[in-house]
Image (spheres, rainbow, N blue to C red):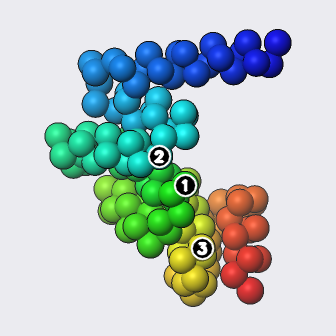
């Protein structure tokens, strides 16, 4: 049963990758299939058409994080935050990217910013604890 469900999901994401009606759609499908390098290229292509596209930029940040390119991910999260400065998930992503890049002070600042807005944010609390 699980194999059947996984096969169906893979087929659906494969169709999404093949569809070119929306620049963001291929990146979403490629990411879901674990094809992160291709998802990065698709995300950059989408941003070339619309540099302020939240969805493309936020997914590219997560893709870079998944590729373990933490410094690049931090830059992309920071870019999104210049456009959407109150986005807690982007702040949290920035924090974890900085933490994985070995920049604990910057990570701590990002997590504290999240907790200043939402004191019970579990992932920010965990991230801040990991900075110690």
Mark 3 Cα shell of 10 Å, populated few (<14), some (14-19), many (≥20) = some
Disc number placed over residue 36 in the picture, else none: 2
Residue at 69 percent across and 21 percent down: it is 6
Mark with earlier residue (3, 2) = 2
Residue at the right extreme of this rendering: 1
Residues tagged 2 and 1 counted as in contact (Cβ below 8 A):
yes
Mark 2 Cα shell of 10 Å, populated few (<14), some (14-19), many (≥20) = many
Which of the pair 72/89 is nearer the observer?
Answer: 72
Residue at 68 percent across and 65 percent down: it is 124
Mark with earlier residue (3, 1) = 1
Which element carries disc 3, helix, strand or loop?
A: helix
In the picture shown, does residue 61 fall above or below 6? below
Which element carries disc 1, helix, strand or loop?
A: helix
Which of the pair 94/71 is nearer the observer?
Answer: 71
Report whether residue 109 is seen: no
Residues tagged 3 and 2 counted as in contact (Cβ below 8 A):
no
Disc number placed over residue 44 in the picture, else none: none
Q: CA distance from mark 2 to mark 1?
A: 7 Å
Disc number placed over residue 66 in the picture, else none: 1
Q: Quadrant of the C terminus?
A: bottom right
Give residue 30's position: percent from left, percent from top.
Answer: 46, 34
Instruction: Identify the residue position indicated by label 3 in the image.
Output: 100
Report whether residue 125 is seen: yes
Mark 1 Cα shell of 10 Å, populated few (<14), some (14-19), many (≥20) = some
In the picture shown, does residue 10 fall above or below 95? above
Mark with earlier residue (2, 1) = 2
Q: Quadrant of the N terminus?
A: top right
User: Which quadrant of the figure has residue 96?
Assistant: bottom right
Give residue 123's position: percent from left, percent from top.
Answer: 71, 60
Give residue 103's position: percent from left, percent from top.
Answer: 55, 84
Q: CA distance from mark 3 to mark 2?
A: 18 Å
């Amino acid at each position: 049963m699980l194999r059947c469900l996984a096969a169906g999901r893979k087929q659906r994401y494969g169709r999404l990758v093949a569809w070119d009606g929306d620049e963001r759609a291929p990146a979403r499908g490629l990411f879901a299939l674990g094809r992160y390098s291709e998802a990065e290229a698709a995300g950059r292509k989408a941003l070339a058409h619309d540099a302020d596209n939240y969805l493309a930029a936020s997914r590219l940040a997560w893709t870079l994080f998944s590729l373990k390119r933490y410094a690049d991910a931090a830059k992309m999260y920071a870019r999104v935050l210049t456009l959407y400065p109150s986005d807690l998930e982007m702040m949290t992503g920035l924090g974890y990217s900085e933490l994985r890049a070995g920049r604990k002070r910057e990570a701590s600042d990002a997590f504290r910013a999240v907790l200043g807005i939402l004191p019970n944010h579990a992932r920010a609390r965990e991230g801040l604890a990991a900075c110690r």
